[in-house]
Image (cartoon, grey):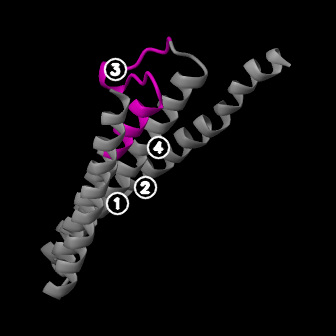
Amino acid sequence: MRRILELSRYIVVLPVIGSILGAIALMLIGVWEVGTSILKIGDTEATLKDTVVGILTAVDTLLLATVLLVIGYGLYELFVDAEITLPKWLVTNNLDDLKNKLIGVVVTIIAVVFLGQLVDNKSSYDVLLAGVGSGALVLALAAFVFATSKREK
């Protein structure tokens, strides 16, 4: 029974593969979106606003791809092979490390999405609501990180 439990950790390879394949797909989509936005610059009918929103959407897609990569690498390192060679900032020693890395990227995505709302919306009330919602979410994530890191000490 013990051997079965020890080997069961390798089932995590499935979400690792899924995360990395999803990241690759999103990176290709993000690069395509950036290329499309750059090509629209030469179009006389495309506005600066459309170009900025297109590039911000692409950046959002690329950041989501990064999240999937961090998840894939982190899970692989935690469950399958702790000796994998990764950059120092990407090394994951426990699930809390992975959680903190993900929260950092999520906060960045929230900022990019809000910036897209700021550029794209015509109503200042909608921008205000998006800003308050984004700020509340960032504060909640910061409080979560603070509460869980304080509890560990």
Residue 13 within the magenta-colored segment of the rendering: no
Residue 151 lies, with reference to residue 92, above or below; the image says below
Identity, as a three-letter code, of the amino acid under mark 2: Ile
Mark 4 Cα within 10 Å, few/some/many (few <14, many 20+)? many
Q: Earlier in the sequence, mark 2 or mark 4?
A: 2
Magenta stretch bounds: 83-103
Left or right of residue 50, residue 69 in this image: right
Mark 2 Cα within 10 Å, few/some/many (few <14, many 20+)? some
Disc 4: which residue: 68
Q: Find residue 35 and report its image quarter.
A: bottom left
For the residue pair 19 and 58, the one nearer the viewer reads as 19
Q: Find residue 81 and report its image quarter.
A: top right
Q: Earlier in the sequence, mark 4 or mark 3?
A: 4
Disc 3: which residue: 87
Q: Secondary structure at mark 4?
A: helix
Q: Residue at x 47, y 43 (%)?
A: 68
Residue 91 lies, with reference to residue 141, above or below; the image says above
Tell me where residue 12 appears, x and y as whole percent. Answer: 65, 32
Identity, as a three-letter code, of the amino acid under mark 4: Leu
- Label 2 to label 1, Cα distance in Å? 6 Å
Choose mark 1 or mark 4, whichever is in front: 4
Q: Residue at x 30, y 24 (%)?
A: 89
Contact? badges 4 and 3 (CB < 8 Å): no
Disc 2: which residue: 29
For the residue pair 57 and 80, the one nearer the viewer reads as 80
